[in-house]
Amino acid sequence: MEYPNTKFSRKVRLAMLIVFIIAFFVISPIIIMYTAGFRYDWQNGLLKETGAISVDVEPKTATVYLNGIRLQDKMPIRLNNIAPAKYNLRISAPEYFDWQKEIEVKNKQTNYTKEISLIKKGKPEILINGQVDNINISFDGRFIIYSTQKNNTTEIWLWDNTANQGTILSRLNNKKPLKIIWAEKNNYALITDESAPYSRLLIINPENPSKQTDLVKNNSVIKKFQWGNSVEPQLYYSTRDNIFLYSPVTAKAQVVTKNTYIDWYMEDGQLWTMKTDSTTKQYNITRDTLGFNSAFNHLDSTDINLATGKIVSSNLQILAARQNTILLKNAKDSEMILLTNSNRYKISADKFLISKYNNWWLLWSQWELWTYSEGEEPYLLNRSGEYLQEVTPMDKYNTLAITWANKTTVLFPYYLATHDLLNEKITDIAADTDNKIIYFVNKTKNKEGIWKLSY
């Protein structure tokens, strides 16, 4: 049965077929290109491929905003088919500082925001009242050693965070600046003068603070010392004639080798040395001198300080060595030399440290902060007209606390994102990165003492 006027003529059916075929060939590519990640930019009249955004930070309950629009709360977050452009990314969590950064999404690329731990908005608490000169914290964060001045006496104190009490270690009848150096992997400390000649080399075991050993009293002039990086406490030191290994546990020293070197450094049981070649007059650096004994690199008279024109090797010291990199410095200049097997880099810096979580170097002067990773060239991370006082690693993601003249900021170096942490002048700072606590010295009136801040 047919209804009146419902039968299409042949011309109408043919026209409809043509329309459907055209629609198929027009719509199908659009669908295919859309699913493949292409979008049409109506503003510029261009067809663009899309990118993606991936966010995975701590705490996992943080909220993510993209151009002010709130995204899902659960981490990790993955957004596909994002049009190439710049976006404002903000990550927030209750009682934490916001993390904010302008990110750029590019064609067929994923923009990653990861390996970030947000910083808590803590309130500093006074830990120890009174005038304090410097502080240093043990590798596990349990102990703090600090010094204070009373009349013409320097008092050295040990603070136990577990017992929440302090013990006096020593009273010195002078105001000569001191250095407090903890071992890398155990709770032994060394108290010594800031520079040679050393009038003391005092070894402290905080578990038994009354038992102290001063190596200077039992030796001729000690030229250099260095904690070993083993779990068992080991201290290397050298006199004019020998390099020694001292065990604080057994209170015994043994000769490692004759000291015939300009300088030396011990890394994981391998002795790095620097020595003059009598023929070429070069300063040869050898790795594992007592083992496989491989020539690493050298310096010669062309390696001069660019500012003074003086040969740097005359007062050259080995500051550190890790894997395939060694750091040297002229004691009379604020310039360091990074050496690899095949390259050398001169960096304007007078302080350095190496992250305990990875082989990541930080070198800085009052105005510049450089970073270095093995296999890459040194990178200028920050240059500022402000006075850069100290750089302190805060976590395993290489987040840094940057202490300036009148404030301390947090820097996320991989993203160059930053925010203020402390808006006050501090004179010394140390971080317990495992428990996320910063200890700092404040000498401001009514705030004198050691303060702690959980982050």
Image (spheres, rainbow, N blue to C red):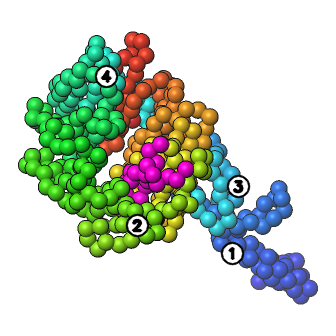
Q: Nearer the viewer, residue 423 or 341?
A: 341
Q: Is residue 357 magenta?
A: no
| Amino acid at dot 4 | Lys
Range of the magenta residues?
310-332
Circle 1 sits on which residue?
Answer: 32
Q: Amino acid at mark 1?
A: Ile
Percent across and percent down for residue 290 are: 25, 68
Q: Which residue reaches farthest left?
A: 250
Quadrant hosting residue 446 = top left
**304 over 349 or under it: above or below:** below
Classify residue 375 as left or right of residue 31.
Answer: left
Looking at the image, residue 202 sits to the left or right of residue 124; the answer is left
Per the image, the residue denoted by label 2 is 278
Tell me the distance, in whole angstroms, between the alpha carbons under discs 1 and 4.
78 Å
| SS label for mark 3 | strand
- Which mark is nearer the camera, 1 or 4? 4
Category of crowding for the residue at label 4, using alpha-carbon neighbours closer than 10 angstroms: few (below 14), some (14–19), many (at least 20): some
Drawn side of residue 189 relative to residue 400, left or right: left
**Residue 407: x %, y % from top left:** 51, 28
Q: Amino acid at mark 3?
A: Ala
Of the residues under marks 4 and 2, which one precedes in the sequence? Answer: 4
- Could you say where residue 393 lies in the image, as x and y percent from the top left? 41, 43
Q: Residues within 10 Å of mark 3 (few under 14, many from 20)?
A: few
Q: Is residue 9 visible?
A: no
Q: From the image, tell me which residue sits under label 4.
A: 175
Q: CA distance from mark 4 to mark 3?
A: 59 Å
Q: Earlier in the sequence, mark 3 or mark 2?
A: 3
Kindly identify which residue carries mark 3.
85
- Residue 430 image-quadrant placement: top left
Tell me where residue 254 sits by quadrant.
Answer: bottom left
